Amino acid sequence: MANAVLHSIHPLLRQPGCASWTLYLDKLGFERNGDAESKTSALKEAKSIYGKQKDRLKESLPIARWLSALGKQHGDRYRCVTLVNQSPLMLHLGRASVLENVGIYTDRTTGLPTIPGSAIKGVLGTWATWEANRQQDGSFPEADDWQMSRASFPADRAERILGCNLDSGSEHAGDIVFVGAYPKTVPVLGLDIVNPHRDANGRDTNPIPNVFLCIEPGTQWDFVFYAKVGTANAKTWLDATDTWLKDALAQSGVGAKTAAGYGRFGSAATSSVPVGVTVKVLTPEEQAQKTAAIQNLRNDYTEAEFKNKIVDRLNPGKLEQLKGEIEKLQKPENQVALDRLKKLLALKDYKKIREGLRDKAWFPKEWLPTP
C-alpha cells in the first residue's frame, strides 16, 4: 500500500509546476531495506525534481520586493550586503528528513534555498572571538586559552551587535537583527561527498562515501540585517557588522566543512585563505578518491539504476520502456552508462534486441554496432 502511494505521488512531484521538491526530500526519499546506494539515488532524484521546478522557484525570487519594503520601513537602520558564494555551500546537515545528513536549508513555504539569520549571527559571534584573541603576530592561542580580552579588542562592540552572553546570564539582546540571506537567482544544486573515515591502521571503516546536497558556487546572495528602533549611533554598528560579515564569510565561511574551504563568500570570484585557520588539505590519494566519487555522482545511474532502467529493459517485451532513458543517456555526464549500453548491444546474446531497436524510430542508430 505504501509503495503504491509513493508511486502515485512521485509523478506529481516531477511536474514543473509543483513547488514541493522538499516533500520528496524530507518525507518520500527513504527506501525501506534499501542498499548502500539508496541515499545517493534519493538525493539524485531530489536534485532532479528541484531542477524541473526551477521556473516555479523563480516565482519565489520576488522576495526582493519584500526586502525593499523592509528597507523602506527601517530607512537608515537597514543594510543589505550582496556577496557571492565562491565555494560549495552545505548548511543544515541536521535537517529533519527521512535521509540522514542532507546538507541544505530551504524556506519552508517556497522550497527556495536560504541562509537563516541565526547561522549568520553564529558565524559573526565566532569571528568576534577570533578577533578578540588574535595575537600581535597574527596567530591565535590554543583553544583552551581563548578568552575575550577587553584590553586588546572592543568587546563592547560585540555586545552591542550580538548581545550579552555572560556565564551568569544574558543581560540584554544585541542591537542588530539578522534577517538572513536570500539568493538573487535560483541556486544550482550539486552532490558532494565526505570521504570514508579510516581507523588507526589506515583501513576504511565504511568504504561507501557519504553523499550530501550542496549549493554550487556562483550564486549572488543578499545578506540582510538592520538596527533596532532607538539604537543610538546605528550607522556605527551597521558599519561594524558590515565589515565583520565580509571578513567572516571570506575567511571563515558558513555552514559545514568550512575547514575544507566550503561556505566562503566574497564580492568577486576570488579565493581566500582564512587568517589563523588551517584549511585541511587532502592527500593526493584522498583527492583522487573524492574526484572520482564526485564525478560518478554527476551521472544519473547508480549500479542498481543501470540494471533496473537499462539492462532489465533490453528484452523484446520492455524495449518501449527504454525510450524514456534516451534523453538522459545523451547527457555528457552519463557517457559511462552509454558506453556500457553500447558494449551490451555488441554482445552476441543481444542480436534480437539489436534487430528490435533498429525498427524503433526513437533509438539512435549510431549506438548500435556496425553490422
Image (spheres, grey):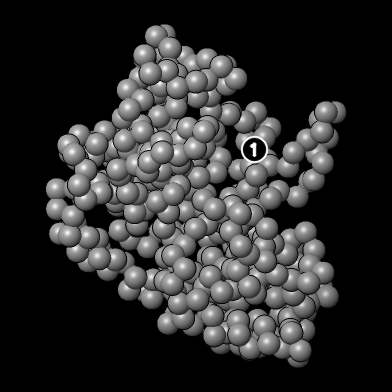
Q: Nearer the viewer, residue 371 or 369?
A: 369
Please report the residue visible at 75 percent of the width from the left and 67 percent of the height from the top: 304
| Residue 177 appears left or right of 303 | left
Q: Nearer the viewer, residue 298 or 126?
A: 126
Is residue 159 among what the camera can see? yes
Residue 346, horizontal then vertical, whole percent: 74, 69
Q: Position of residue 182 (x, y in %)?
A: 34, 57
Q: Residue at x 57, y 21 (%)?
A: 143
Q: How many marks?
A: 1
Q: Position of residue 191 (x, y in %)?
A: 57, 55
Q: Quadrant of the C terminus?
A: bottom right
The x and y percentages for residue 276 are: 47, 20
User: The residue under label 1 is which amino acid type?
Assistant: Ala
**Corner quadrant of residue 297:** bottom right
Q: Looking at the image, which is closer to me, 205 or 347?
A: 205
Query: Within the image, what quadrant is residue 317 found in?
Result: bottom right
Q: Is residue 330 visible?
A: no
Image point (47%, 62%), residue name: 106
Q: Which residue is mark 1?
A: 288
